[in-house]
Image (cartoon, rainbow, N blue to C red):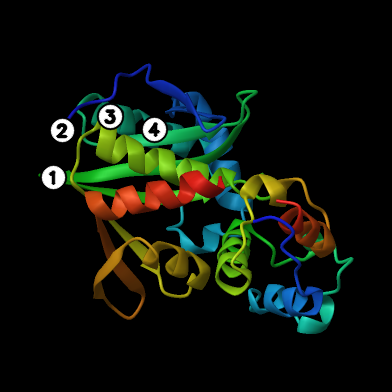
Amino acid sequence: MNRLPAEFEIFNYGIFVRLVQKSDAAFIVNLRQHNKKSIHLSKISNDVEMQEKWLESYKIRELNGEEYYLIFEDDTHKPFGLIRLYDFVENTFTSGSWIMKDGIPEMDSFKADLIAAEIGFDVLKFEKCVIDVRKENKKVVAYHKKFFTVFKEDEQNFYLSMNREQFEKKQSFLKKII
Amino acid sequence: MENNKIDSNLFVEKFAEQFEDTSADTFKLDTIFRDIEEWDSMIALSIIAMVDETFNAKLTGEAIKNSKTIEDLIDKIETN
């Protein structure tokens, strides 16, 4: 796999994406606390200092090429969302912690999701993406099932995977509508 | 698609079907869809898919972004 440089930033589909910084801690805490969809994500501390400490340890993992936490910004550099790429095992990566501010333009969520997948497949050169989605999060489950294959499920979650061919179908579909 | 005339009653019915927790009575042509509590990007995507599947027509994210009411969406599809 390739690595992302610390100063990584791209602008695509009208939005910016870069790696999170320690200074993003307050934004992250605020987003995770106040977004109505965050009930489907694991709980994090509501303490900005705790988040800063978590980001300090994340930055070491980032430096080692073990994990990338992406922050999405509009065309004025106002941050609106987060996606984390992690669990890099052989040719596979996990995409998770997908959370966007309420009230952003509808397609910005999908632009961010598409860019994250493009980074995973086209920049980092992984061959497969895996995700887990809470079953109760029905709309997100329906969205991912359009492109991913369910390979496991338990009482709480679906576990899905997407290979390059499926990713390219997703890319083609989303490019037509975003 | 040019001059794609949309059955507005059917459109409102199918639009309402994309919502799980909102009563179908809520939806009228002049409903401002962003004012509906349940509205989100996932529903926007399901509306796009519904327009494709039910009306064989195209609705883009940009058209949704530039619409306020359900009727605006129909206009955007018909003039696409």
Residue found at x 24% / y 24%: A63
Q: Position of residue A9 (x, y in %)?
A: 42, 21
Give, as a three-letter code, the residue at label 4. Leu
Asked whether disc 2 touches disc 1, contact meaning CB atoms under 8 Å apart, the reply is yes
Which residue is under mark 4?
Answer: A55
From this viewpoint, is residue A59 visible?
yes
Q: Is residue B22 visible?
A: no
Q: Are marks 3 and 4 in contact (CB under 8 Å)?
A: no
Q: In which quadrant of the rendered view does residue B14 lie?
A: bottom right
Q: Which residue is mark 1?
A: A91
The chain identifier of the residue carrying mark 2 reads A
CB under 8 Å between discs 2 and 3: no
First in residue order: circle 4 vs circle 1: 4
Q: Which mark is residue A12?
A: none
- What separation in Å lies between label 3 and label 4 (alpha carbons)? 10 Å
Q: Are marks 1 and 3 in contact (CB under 8 Å)?
A: no
Residue at the right extreme? Answer: B30
* 3 and 4 marks on the same chain: yes
* Residue A62 - label: 3
Q: Which chain is mark 4 on?
A: A
Nearer-the-camera pick, B8 or A84: B8
Q: Amino acid at mark 2?
A: Met
**Subunit bearing disc 1:** A
Q: Amino acid at mark 3?
A: Glu
Of callouts 1 and 3, which one flags the residue occurring earlier in the amino acid sequence? Answer: 3
Residue A1: numbered disc:
2
| Label 2 to label 3: alpha-carbon separation | 14 Å
